[in-house]
Amino acid sequence: MIEHPVTAPPRPLALGEAPLRALAAVHGAFAARLAPTLSAPLRTFVDVEAGVPEETEAPVPSDGGAPYIFTAAAAGGAPIGLALDGRLAALLGEHLLGGSGPLPDTARPLSAVEHRLVASLVARAFAHLADAWGPAGPFADAPGPDAAPERPLTPGEPVVAVPFSVRVRGTVLGLRLFYPVALVRAALHPHPAAPAAAVGAAGLPVELRAELGRTRLRLADLDALAEGDVIPLGQPLGAPLAVDVAGRTAFHAAAGRSGDRLALQILQAHDAVFLV
């Protein structure tokens, strides 16, 4: 895996609506996996939310210190880039070294040791991305998230960019993924003669998330929680549970069991044909 400081001027390019919706589903699953990976070294809750995929140009390398783009090898050695907000990179670098300072007001250069530690964490993020895509994705037959691509992202080449908001201690920071457009098209449409809905998007794994309920606690009450305490939730007993797909409520369901496992029974479908 290699890294470069970048800027990324946008320029719209052409990609169909259905593939972009499929990307949204994949990256919603990636965001759910990435959040605990970032939360652990920062020792605080980090929320990651995927934005709308956009068509743009590959980042242009610059002499600035941030943001940084890390690249990993996808299928055929093609590059996939992950651009990390400079302030987030600095916070991660400090905490991975055992520090506990606050989020810096501005980005700063990372030391060589911080670079290695942050790069190792980003490699885990690429592994989460491969899991989110599944066997039909661009990491199929790839050499692995630690491997360097056969070439860097070429400035100006057509890419699909996926933005993420990373909320840390009340501040929203940025993270972006960059795919060569040709790589995305190959992942979503492996057989050009077949319909996209039947071949590409339909074969992607999609994560469903059912929410039991939410509530708020004062920090003092949270610190005082002990084994056996009960936390009332806002969800009424027997109310249907919202089932989210890529950050959208696609279904409402009732909780139940299937054999010895928890299960859901779909009661209402709001957007059943989500990917096509």
Image (cartoon, rainbow, N blue to C red):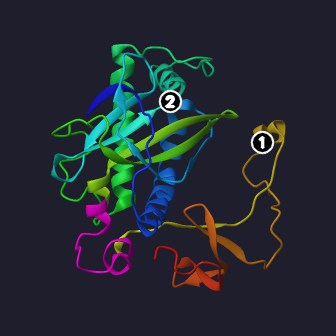
- Asked if labels 2 and 1 touch by Cβ distance under 8 angstroms, the answer is no
Q: Nearer the viewer, residue 33 or 28?
A: 28
Residue toward you, 102 or 154: 154
Q: Amino acid at mark 2?
A: Asp
Could you tell me which residue is drawn at 23 percent across and 35 percent down? Answer: 152
Horizontal and vertical percent for residue 106?
Answer: 58, 17
Image coordinates of residue 252 in percent, x first then y, are: 67, 78
The residue under label 1 is 222
Start-end of magenta stretch: 185-202
Dot 1: few (<14), some (14–19), or many (≥20) neighbours within 10 Å?
A: few
Point out which mark residue 99 bears.
none
Spot occupied by residue 47 in the image (x, y as percentages of width and height): 61, 44
Q: Quadrant of the N terminus?
A: top left
Q: How many discs mark residues in the rendered view?
A: 2
Q: Which residue is mark 2?
A: 85
User: For residue 165: magenta?
Assistant: no
Q: Residue at x 55, y 31 (%)?
A: 42
Cα–Cα span, label 1 and label 2:
30 Å
- Label 1 sits on what residue type? Leu
Question: What residue sits 40% from the left and 58% below the top?
Answer: 132
Q: Is 193 displayed left or right of 245 in the figure?
A: left
Residue 173, above or below 49: above
Residue 131 sits above or below residue 198 on the image: above
Determine the secondary structure under disc 1: helix
Could you say which quadrant of the image residue 218 lies in?
A: top right
Q: Going from the N terminus, do you reach mark 1 or mark 2 first?
A: 2
